[in-house]
Image (cartoon, helix red, strand yellow):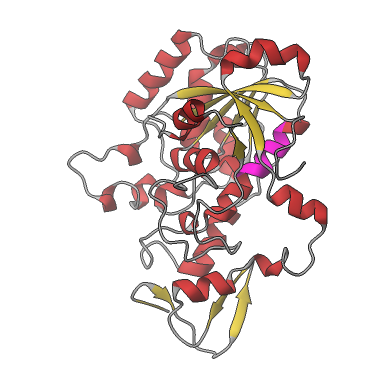
Amino acid sequence: MVRGDFRWCNMGSWTKHGDFRWCNTGPVTAHDAARAIDDDDDVARGASARTRRMSSRAFAASPPDRWLALERARPGCKLITFVRHAEGFHNLRDAVTFDSTYNSALNFDARLTARGEAQCAALAASGVGVDVELVATSPMTRCVQTALTAFPNALERGVPFVANEDLRETVNYWCDRRRSTEELVSEFGDRVDFSACPPTDELWARYEAIAGPPDAWTKHRESCDLYAVANRMRSFLRWLEQRPERRVVVSTHSATLRCLFSYGHPGGVRGAPEQIFDSGGVLDTSKGAPVIDYGGDAEFEALMRADFANCECRDVVIDFSALSPREA
């Protein structure tokens, strides 16, 4: 059962559910959660050197004006356009309450509004991504809609559109739950490849097992475990590294982008809640291993760490052949 702000159980010992543990003797404090949800002590208890490197890897990023210089000189480089999805119904926050937006069952796997569709049309008309070779998207409906509507030229040219579960929004509220892969394929499967996505929303189930259903726990879930989100983004970039395409569009979410570009940097992830579900022993998001290495370019770092507006896109050159100082 749930009492107050914490999950309660009744047995009287540390138990494990899925990838997480909780204390069964009473309310789980932030300290308890940090101790218990420790990723099974993989690093501390002798995970392989390769696993440690991969979990701390930072990817070298540069401004897009370096693309022409790097494209031929560094075959491991890719020019990536990151775009936040257009306006969804869960983003309609004027004159409404929190419970009727993010945490409303009506916004389960929220769709785009008419304004969001118009934002996509405007982006399409701007010519962004005319030479794209791959469109990777979160499987969430609003991101798939954004990818398909904002980049119709890529669709017409037969460019692959691929859904990647690692691009999901941080799972916190009703709007962050996704439909089954079967339902998504039914609507978008003729244009988007969902073959790598699990059949059901395993990510949501993972955090519901910790915090309870959305009517019982209305606060952050995965945003209280940004270590895991950062590693999701590392996993996505490793996947992208193995793809042959070098000119890529990525359709994803605001909080995911905020974590990608800010985790492990001074000041940490802006607005991050207390990391009570932390799975890596990193309670301060400024102290974790960065996903992105800006190479000391403070101006570019500030640009990328600023919040994305709906349907805003920014270009980044990622040099996958470069080793960050942590790996060298």
Q: From the top left corner, tell me how far across and down residue 315 is, in percent.
A: 54, 21
Quarter of image, res 312: top left
Instruction: Provide residue 40's location: percent of width, then percent of height.
Output: 68, 69
Q: Is residue 145 visible to us here? A: no
Quarter holding the C terminus is top right
Return the residue found at the far bottom.
Answer: 12
* Left or right of residue 212, residue 92 in this image: left
> What residue is shown at x 77% (from left), y 15% (from top)?
73
Q: Which of 291 and 121 lies nearest the eye of the viewer?
A: 291
Q: Quadrant of the N terminus?
A: bottom left
**Vertical order, 176 against 219 (above or below):** above
Magenta region, residue range = 233-240
On the picture, is 189 further left or further right than 2? Answer: right
Nearest to the observer: residue 99 or residue 108: 99
Instruction: Identify which residue, 158 or 187, lies in the foreground.
Output: 158
Q: Is residue 299 above or below residue 29?
A: above
- Residue at left 61%, top 81%? 15
* 239 within the magenta span: yes
Main secondary-structure element of the magenta-colored stretch: helix
Residue in the picture at 73% in, 65% down: 42
**Corner quadrant of residue 295:** top right
| 245 to the left or right of 250 | right
